[in-house]
Structures are given as structure tokens and as C-alpha cells.
Image (tube, grey):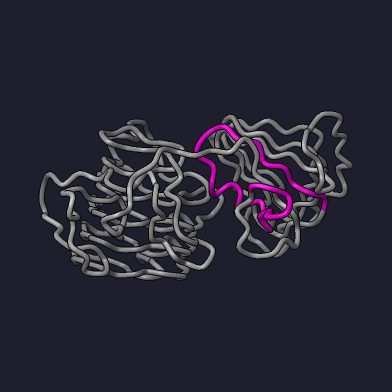
Amino acid sequence: EGSGGGITCLENSSPRLEGCQILENRGLNAGALSCVNQSSPTLINCVMARNTGGWGGAAFIDDDPSRPNFIHCTITDNTPGPAGAAVYGRESQAVTLKNCIVWNPGPEFRKETGQNWERQFIVTYSSVQGGWPGVGNLSAYPQFVDSSQGDYHLRNASPCIDSATTAGKPIVDVDAENRTRPGEDGLADMGAFESPPEFQPGGPVTPPVYYVRSGAEAGGDGLSWGTAFASIGAALSRVDAPVEIWVAVGTYRECVWLEPSASVFGGFRGTETTRAGLNAPVPDTLIDAGGIHGAAVIGANEAVLDGFTVTGGGENGVLCLQSSPTLNRCVITNPAGYG
């Protein structure tokens, strides 16, 4: 009934999880955590990462109501179904997140019906991709050490360092690895891991362009053609402000969740320093989601996709759900789709 790939809470179940890692699970409703029948767990210093769920990539909360509480959790790299979100809720319950990092493909929060999303998802002192209303919230990329290898500690100068609040209950006096929290300076970091005392916070750093090249070596930072990301999704995972993503010709076998304020341009040869005069050969830059259930491209407001062939979505080539992206010079061919 609950169908959470990692944990399912049913019938007034409200466990307390501290320092747990819920990783790489699959569930019909939620990848990591499903809360059903008035179940309201508390998660402290937990990492929920790389999970996949039909509605909630990380969490699904039913409308009975269930009211989970997340404190100092890192919720990242979780993939929902095409109509879902990282944390998906039905009507009437309130989900509380404090001192968390929420950074995933697609929408971070979505409810099934109605308005007043900010009343359903009460988020404070947290870093949320795309932003979210609430005291102390950020929308700056957390600067993980190496998310591609599952290392979700914060780099020095991450904007999430010293940005959490130490007020309120329950008191959390250690992090996920039993480091003292708050640190020696009396300040605390967002997310599951506290940084070394010598680390200092920094402001958001958004380059004007991220580069993507099929077959690029792992470990690139996306800041040049020589250090390009190998996937479009890797570049989109860094988006925290208006930015361009330049994609070299090639085939990209992935489902692409567009992000607000990201403009994704295809058709580059991998040497350009400007978009001036770019005439994208559309068939040469291919997003192929063959074998992936759902859609090949999922839209977002204020997003642009320019110069691509899109194919292979199991149900849709391009899905626009509560979103209005701009598509330029694209070929959408999806013979296997039935949406």
C-alpha cells in the first residue's frame, strides 16, 4: 500500500531516524520514504540520495494526514516520475524541513491538488534548487565535494556552510558522522554533514556557461570544453541562476529535466567560444530516452531547449506539466510513445 522503496510508514507509524543513509532504492510511490495512514516520521542528519519513485523521487506523503519532519537532511539526486517531484504530497498534510539541502532533478516539491504549496511544505534555513519561500532559505548550489561519486560533504566556500539555524527543538548536537554541531564558531551547516572548523561560507558562484560533451571524461567541472560534463543532467544539476548550457553534437541517452532559468543549446562542435553564428544541425544533437519510462524531456518555466532532436520517451517526447518552456529548432520524434 505505502510502496516506499527504502522505508514505508503505515498505520500511525512515526519512527525517528538519525544519521541514516537511504540510497539507490526504487518504489512505486516513493524512492526513499513513503508516509501513509497518519504516519509522521522524524529524520535527522539523514542522506536520501539517488532514489527513484513514481511520485516522490525521495518522499511520498499521503493525505490522511501524515506529517514528516526533516532536520539537517541532505535530499539530492532523487528522480521522480514525470508528474512527480523530489517530495510529493497529497492534500491536507504539512511537511516540515529545517536546515536541509533539497537539490534534485525536476521540481523539489509538488502537491496533488489545490493551492498554498508554501503552507503544505514548510521549509526554513534550507538550500532548495529553484528557491522556496521561508526564513533563511537559499537557492545557491551547495557545492558538494563530488556528487557523481556520492560524496555529499560540502566544499570550502559552500554557501550552505554556517547558514543553518541553531534555534528550536529538537536540539541536534552532532552531525551524521558524530561531529559536534554547532561547530567551534557556534554556527551550523545545512545538510547532514558539518564542515571542518576552518571552512568558511561563500556566496553563490554561477558561471555564464556550462559545457557538455558526449563521452567526456568523468570528473569534469563543466567550465570548459576540455572539462565538460558528459551528460546534460549533470550540468542542469548545477543550475541555481540564469545560465546557458552548451551541448556538443552527439547522442545523450538520458531523460532531461529542464530547470527554470536554464537555456540549453545544442549543435556545438566542441571548440566554440561564442554562440554567434551558431547554426545547429538539429539531427546531430540527440536526446534519446529509449528504454526510460515517461518522457524524454520534461519542461520547466523560463527554460529554453534549442537545437535538439528529442526521441525515445516511453510515453511522451516532451512533457509540459504546470510548466511553459520555450523550444526552438527542435525535432520531436517519438515513435514508441503513446502519451
**Residue 252, image x, y percentages:** 74, 56
Bounds of the magenta segment: 223-249
299 vs 24, left or right, is right
Q: Nearer the viewer, residue 97 or 29?
A: 97
- In the rendered image of this protein, does residue 310 appear above or below residue 51? above
Query: For the view shown, which residue lies furthest in the front direction?
Result: 198
Q: Nearer the viewer, residue 229 or 112?
A: 229
206 vs 325, left or right, is left
**Residue 243, image x, y percentages:** 60, 35
142 vs 266, left or right, is left
Quarter placement of the N terminus: bottom left
Say which residue appears at 25% left-offset and 44% top-offset. 94
Residue 188 magenta-drawn? no
Say which residue appears at 40% left-offset and 43% top-offset. 128
> In the figure, residue 263 lies in which quadrant?
top right
Q: Nearer the viewer, residue 52 or 227?
A: 227
> In the figure, residue 33 lies in which quadrant?
bottom left
**Residue 72, image x, y percentages:** 26, 55
- Count of marks, rendered view: 0
Say which residue appears at 23% left-offset and 53% top-offset. 69
- In the rendered image of this protein, does residue 10 appear above or below residue 189? below
Say which residue appears at 82% left-offset and 46% top-offset. 271
- In the rendered image of this protein, does residue 217 appear above or below residue 298? below
**Residue 212, image x, y percentages:** 70, 51
- In the rendered image of this protein, does residue 214 appear above or below residue 321? below
Q: Nearer the viewer, residue 312 or 181?
A: 181
Residue 247 magenta-drawn? yes
